[in-house]
Image (cartoon, grey):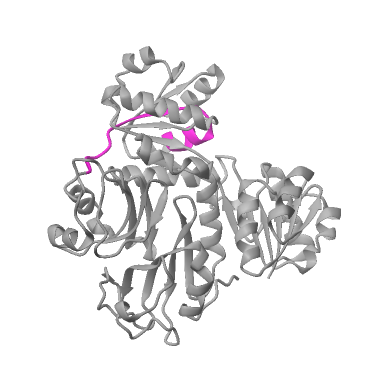
Amino acid sequence: MKVVVIGAGEVGRNISDILSKEGNDLIIIDKDEARLKTVTETLDVQTITGSGSSPRILKKAKLDQAEMVIAVTDSDETNIVACLIASTQSKVPFKIARIRMPDLDQNSVIFDKNHLKIDLCINPEREAVNKAISIMDYSGASEIIDFAEGRIKMVAFSIDRSCAAVGKNLIELNNLYGGDILIASIIRSNELIIPKGNSTIRAKDYIFAFAETKNVRTLLKFFGKDTEPVQRVFILGGGNTSLMLAEQLEVKGISTKIIEKRQDRCEMLSERLNKAVCLLGDGTSQDLLKEENIQEADYFIAVTGDEEANILSALLAKQLGAKRAICLINKVDYSHLIPIIGIDGVMNPRQATIGKILHFIRKGKIISATPLSDEKAEAVEFIALETSEITGKPLKNIKFPKGTIIGAIMRNNRVIIPGGDTMILPDDRVILVTLRSAISQIEKILTVKLDYF
């Protein structure tokens, strides 16, 4: 498939990395020569220096031959114009644009088939906010990933020293839990482990477990997590992410306080929000946090543009009594530090955007491929084929690539947490976790490629 990617920033580079390794023909456009040089040093793609909204540059990129345009520059205007040109001059079948303006989203009439004809509009901050809301809906979890149209969830959380699971292997855990529990992966000392039945849980492990959605809270309680409803939230930062987050919290009836240094942003937030309180001040000030009763906060959420400040302020808030803390972080290098230092969750706009794009453009029997943790592993959701090597055999008899585990199956609207004797049948909806390095082997076993529209 021929794809034109406009923008060689974090999102554009990562999407290009994934698509190029899967055999697609990519051309990347960016105005920054240094960015493009970095891309060509690591990826087998063509690059063109220039503006993605220039008809001349798009013609040079052979837009008329492209099957998809992915516009993910930092400029909404550039992304919109690029998709407009793709619609009116070249009839590109599929167009994806990153649109960060809070007032515009996928449902805006401007993007429908009678206007700009953009097939998918993504707001990275809105996607990150949705992730944070999911975490708060299941307080106690650090990450929540949906599969099977929301019927199955992968839940991530850290193991405290006081947890009853510490020192027990997975077989003992199943007996203690009194039901089906499947731990898909463990991050321990920055190493990713795909566990077996005799694998033992240790304190400070970071766990990814599968559960039917209705059983998620029961699972979290079993591992000693507080699942009480969220009532009070502090937000550090007054940018667009803060605005979108506060709007959703207001809808849920959650008491919200926003701390922001800039007076003009405070005034704007006060005008836009109905009940949230905007405080003018420094969110790293112990006196301010104590004065506003930070110890009563169920969550402290740091969403400034400074990732280091987000981490430090979150740690301070927890030290002063906030129950949980979530940080907005884009750098993958920081991901493994989060559970170790005591922060409870991450909002990663870049990763959320990549996941949304991949989910949209996958077709056929592969439904989605979601990166986990530091992106060394993926959770792949697919429809089992009759021709696949994995159908009609007990799982214990299938030779999966090292580091692969079947996490959950949905059959005829029934969720199955599998064991060694479980068999996958044709048309089952299956979720597996595997190392990214094993994806090509997984494709062969499934008899299906990670194809696109």
213 to 243, vertically: above or below: below
53 to 447, vertically: above or below: above
Disc tally is: 0
Q: Quadrant of residue 61?
A: bottom right
Q: Residue at x 36, y 79 (%)?
A: 398
Quarter of the image with the C terminus is bottom right
229 with respect to 313 (left or right): left
Q: Quadrant of residue 27?
A: bottom right
- Residue 4 vs residue 345, the one in the foreground: 345
Question: Where is residue 138 shown, x and y percent of the image?
Answer: 29, 46
- Look at the image and say whether residue 104 sits in the magenta stretch: no
Question: Where is residue 214 shown, x and y percent of the image?
Answer: 24, 58
Q: Residue at x 41, y 15 (%)?
A: 285
- Residue 102 vs residue 208, the one in the foreground: 208
Q: Is residue 150 visible to the viewer in this orientation of the structure?
A: yes
Q: Is residue 118 visible to the viewer in this orientation of the structure?
A: no
Q: Residue at x 69, y 58 (%)?
A: 43
Question: Where is residue 253 shown, x and y percent of the image?
Answer: 31, 36
173 with respect to 443 (left or right): left
Quarter of the image with the N terminus is bottom right
Question: Where is residue 64 shown, x and y percent of the image?
Answer: 79, 66
Magenta segment, which residues? 225-246
326 with respect to 181 (left or right): right
423 with respect to 71 (left or right): left
286 to 348, vertically: above or below: above
Q: Quadrant of residue 83?
A: bottom right
Q: Residue at x 53, y 41 (%)?
A: 330
- Look at the image and say whether residue 241 sits in the magenta stretch: yes
